[in-house]
Amino acid sequence: MRELTQEQKKIIYIASIVAGSLLAFIIFVYMPQSKKLGTIRRQLIEADTQIAEIGRITEGKDLNAAVKDLSAKLSVASKILPSDESDVVTKLTDLARRLKLQINTLDPQGDIKSAQGVAGYDLSELPVILSLTGEFRAIGEFLDDLRTDFPALVKVKNLAIQGNGEGRPALSASLEVSAILAQEK
């Protein structure tokens, strides 16, 4: 085997130094900066997503105007949502009386706290078991008013309507109404 000349040794040393420098650059500069760049890209995507969400909420309006509009809507919603069981019971009995329905049973089951809330409010659901007797039109109007004009957010569950015998215009209705309650935090 032949010995390397002085020039060949210099070339190998220079190539080794260049390769070592390149390897050190990749390990100590490029890779850490690449990780930082990836983190910055993810943060930029998250910021873009948040900006898009704000744009969707504001509907293209100025942010201050949108905040005022949303605050006004929250204020209106807080006035609509009853704060306790007695509000719901009163509203249900008032509606039944107005429609000349006889209330046989009105049994609030106790409110169930919701894990979700709205800014400044704790929400809960109040199931109420209700049994009514009255003319079929009045019961139909009662159900329609619960759906469209009732001054609280409610949903009707387990509805059962029965006749009270042949030739009698009165019907009996049993239902469970769940109302949403909102209490300020």
Image (cartoon, rainbow, N blue to C red):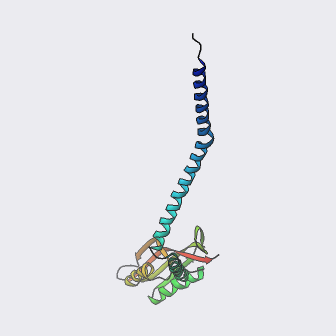
Q: Please tell me which residue is depicted at 41% across the width and 75% down the height of the picture.
A: 162
Which image quarter is the N terminus in? top right
Quarter holding residue 86: bottom right
Seen as rendered, the residue at the extreme top is: 1
- Residue 14: x %, y % from top left: 60, 29
- Residue 102: x %, y % from top left: 48, 85
Q: Is residue 79 above or below residue 44?
A: below
Q: Is residue 53 above or below residue 1?
A: below
Which image quarter is the C terminus in? bottom right
Q: Total of numbered circles in the picture?
A: 0
Seen as rendered, the residue at the extreme left is: 167
Q: Please tell me which residue is depicted at 61% across the width and 77% down the height of the picture.
A: 183
181 or 2: nearer the eye? Answer: 2
78 or 114: nearer the eye? Answer: 78
Seen as rendered, the residue at the extreme right is: 185
6 or 152: nearer the eye? Answer: 6
Quarter holding residue 29: top right
- Residue 32: x %, y % from top left: 61, 45
- Residue 41: x %, y % from top left: 53, 53
114 or 48: nearer the eye? Answer: 48
Q: Report the side of 156 relative to 122 (left or right).
A: left
Q: Is residue 167 above or below residue 23?
A: below
